[in-house]
Image (tube, helix red, strand yellow):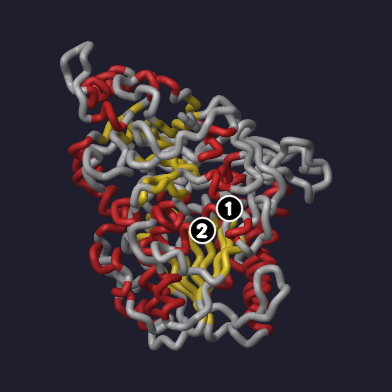
Amino acid sequence: MRRFHGYLLSTAAIAGAMLACGVTVARADDDIRHSHAGHGYKHVLLVSVDGMHSIDLSRWIESHPNGNFAKLAHNGVVYPNAYTTAPSDSYPGILAQVTGGTPKSGGLFYDDSYDRTEYPAKAFYTSKGLPDPGCVGAPGTEITNFEALDKSYNFSTQLVGDITGGGTIGQVYTQLDTDNMQRKLVNGQCVPVFPHEYVRTNTIFEVIKAAGMRTVWSDKHPAYEDLMGPSGAGLDELYAPEINSQDTLDLGAQTGDDYTTSYTGVRTYDSLKVQAVVNWIDGFDGARTHNKPVPAIFGMNFQAVSVGQKLAKSGNADADKSLTGGYLDAQATPGNALTLQLQFVDDALGKFIGELKTKNLENSTLIIVSAKHGQSPINVKDRVAISDALYAGAPGFGANGFEICDDEALVWLSPEMQQATNPATGHPYYADAKAYILANATALHIKQLLDRDELTRFYEDPFHNSRVPDFIAITDHGVICTGGSKLAEHGGFSKDDRNVALLVSSPRITEAKVVQDTTFTTQIAPTILDALDLDPRSLQAVREGGVEVLK
């Protein structure tokens, strides 16, 4: 099954980009660390405002000096040169924040990805009316760590049902369907692979839970069960309403509209997660049905800003039909829709701050606001929409290859052909595939193609690692792979994709500061453990990558 999704950097610049992935990090001013050290924090609230650039944060604080972002910054440290991973997709983006690692250590390059050693899901065959062969034949399959794992997902129509994902929100294993999961051979048995089994390095949730503290998180798909970590036991609760489900909560939503097809819809969706965070602060579970200890680590991701950046105009659920998405200029002036979305997040932060004060938790809670990824391009005039269908014609792609492109392309050849000789040319398929992609570089707007040599240097050898793509095509700035009207995308290596908001705040930080040093979202993970008086080096990726606590 193939899913077509939707600066050229010199080799030296690519090395700099990989540095910015968080493999090694720069040291910032020591006195910043002392402002939130000493530690004694009992709780950390981590918030990911997906799509939010560093410039969005600075502009919003400047234009809304009495807003809640500004209040956090007044007692906080802002890092304007913070960078997320490359590729800058949601899965590696959140794993960076909770493991301290990049795709090299974490093992996942994208939500929608590939593994050369696994086999398709049972439902993949049954939806086509075919008998399930199990784990036989040539391995290699798409990894569908998104709505496709839900119980309500229909493989034959690629539709999902309601927001529960087919189960009970907050009870993630009632939402996931093992028949929809890819499979692998274990001791001769063909078994489903849960999302957490793809993660190759431990998480803050596992470390914190092992220390006897409560751990919870809220995200956009039940597939974020990956945050359980390799042990499968890192989270006490994952509150995961399905974002890509039929919108049944908003007046005006039509059949086929999910929560990302209107600005109103995504705000309504995010509000469910906001309420879950408030419930956790109040000493309940996410659904507010049972009393629970206030978590040591808790938080959520917002999708409102990301949709405000991508969705071109009002959807059916939007009463105001005059709204337009994205930015007004290259200076990141938000348009009317994006302004609404940013205001929604600002107001939600106010709810968190207010509830922490009500429960006398404000001084014992460190708040960290960042983003899994940015969005490119900021300037809509730079937008160039292309088709990525040409990649499927590469020699060696075959029937079992896979490619995904949002604003960069990741390409996996059929595993059985990757290292084989092409009988038509007498050359290795890999060499012929590279030549083919480069020959189509103009049509595909490729500025640089990362091949085996560079991928081995920055990640691992695709000939020996089952997940590393055979090629990553870095496209011209502003290129997005779409046949639709979306204004921007993420996943790539550009500054618009990767320079994200990062703010650390607490009433105990009495002097607002701005740290200009280059920092990385990988540093969030050790900072959280440090704040809770736990050893940051208990994270494997932190030890191996030399990742430091934010200063």
The residue to which callout 2 is attached is: 225
Residue type, mark 2 in image: Glu
Left or right: 390 in relation to 365: left
Left or right: 35 in relation to 312: left
Residue at point 79%, 37% (across, down): 254
How many neighbours does mark 1 have within 10 angstroms: few (below 14), some (14-19), or many (20 or more)?
A: many
Q: Is residue 111 above or below residue 222?
A: above
Residue at point 59%, 35% (across, down): 155
Q: Whole-percent x and y of residue 210?
A: 42, 78
Which element is circle 1 on? loop
The quarter of the image holding the C terminus is bottom left
Which element is circle 2 on? helix
The answer to whether any part of residue 54 appears in the image is no
Count the labels in the image.
Answer: 2
Q: Is residue 44 above or below residue 25?
A: below
The answer to whether any part of residue 324 appears in the image is yes
Residue at point 70%, 44% (across, down): 161
The residue to which callout 1 is attached is: 176
28 or 145: nearer the viewer:
145
Pointer 1 and pointer 2: residues touching (CB < 8 Å)? Answer: yes
Q: Is residue 132 above or below residue 188?
A: above
In which image quadrant can residue 11 be found? top left
